[in-house]
Amino acid sequence: MHAALLAPSLLAGDHAHLAASAAAAATAGAPWLHLDLMDGAFVPNLTFGPETLAALRRAGCQLFFDTHLMLAEPDRYLEAFARAGANLITVHVEPPGDRHATLSRIRELGCQTGLALNPGTPAAAAVPFLEQVDLVLVMTVQPGFGGQPFRRDMLPKLRELDAWRAARGLRFRLEVDGGIDLATAAECRAAGADTFVAGTSFYRAPDQAAFAGAVARL
Ligand code: DX5
Ligand code: ZN
């Protein structure tokens, strides 16, 4: 079983001072930084782009960039995100296109591969890709906005993916994103998750280092 890992979501940081918000994640001891890229098409919101990742790198951020592409046409932007400093690129399974090819391209670009499932998408949709991914992201809210309540009905999906992972002897990480705090993270951990995205709960935590430590001990 993978050690529990925290990925603070910069979406909940201070957008006028993103480098400072990224630095806060590092100072708290979080190993990853989760970056939410939205295009106003796959999801009804906009965030930032590859230039933001590059600027964070230039500002000295060395965290592992866990890049979550909520894009209708992810293939158009893979190279830009890889070049900007992404370490892992997660694409959604839902948009039309050849996702096997998308994942191969991410690997060719030297990044780890992730596949994300919206709440309405069954675990079975990930099965054809399980040998090709380093991470499966189970959305525990409808993507687009931070601060939404955790969807407990996603726990069976986690258990299903965890069981398939064990049955096939695979090593992909199982990540949850949306409404994650220490209580919901513990529920997800019990269902097989090992990688925890936290936006609102991390950035609003009175003691971010204690929050990161508590996740690491899950
Ligand atoms: C939602 C994003 C999340 C978001 C989570 O579409 O994918 O990463 O930042 O925010 P919280 O943790 O506040 O639910
Ligand atoms: Zn996300």
Image (cartoon, rainbow, N blue to C red):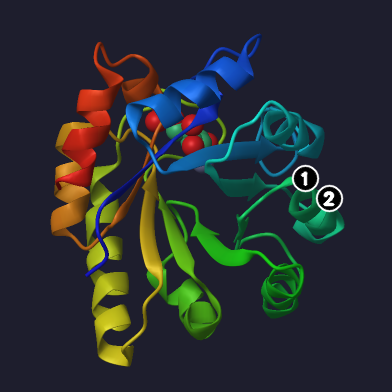
Is residue 76 rendered to the left or right of residue 204? Answer: right
Return the x and y of residue 88 as percentages of the image width and height: 59, 57
Most foreground residue, 150 or 203? 203
Q: CA distance from mark 2 to mark 1?
A: 6 Å
Q: Which residue is mark 2?
A: 80
Instruction: Between label 2 and label 1, give the one nearer the viewer.
Output: 1
SS assignment at label 1? helix
Type of residue at label 1? Answer: Ala
Most foreground residue, 132 or 216? 216
Is residue 13 rendered to the left or right of residue 69? Answer: left
Return the x and y of residue 118 as percentages of the image width and height: 49, 53
Return the x and y of residue 17 as percentages of the image width and height: 62, 11
Q: Which mark is residue 84?
A: 1
Residue at x 19%, y 54% (from the top left corner): 189
Most foreground residue, 149 or 206? 206
SS assignment at label 2? helix
Q: Which mark is residue 186?
A: none
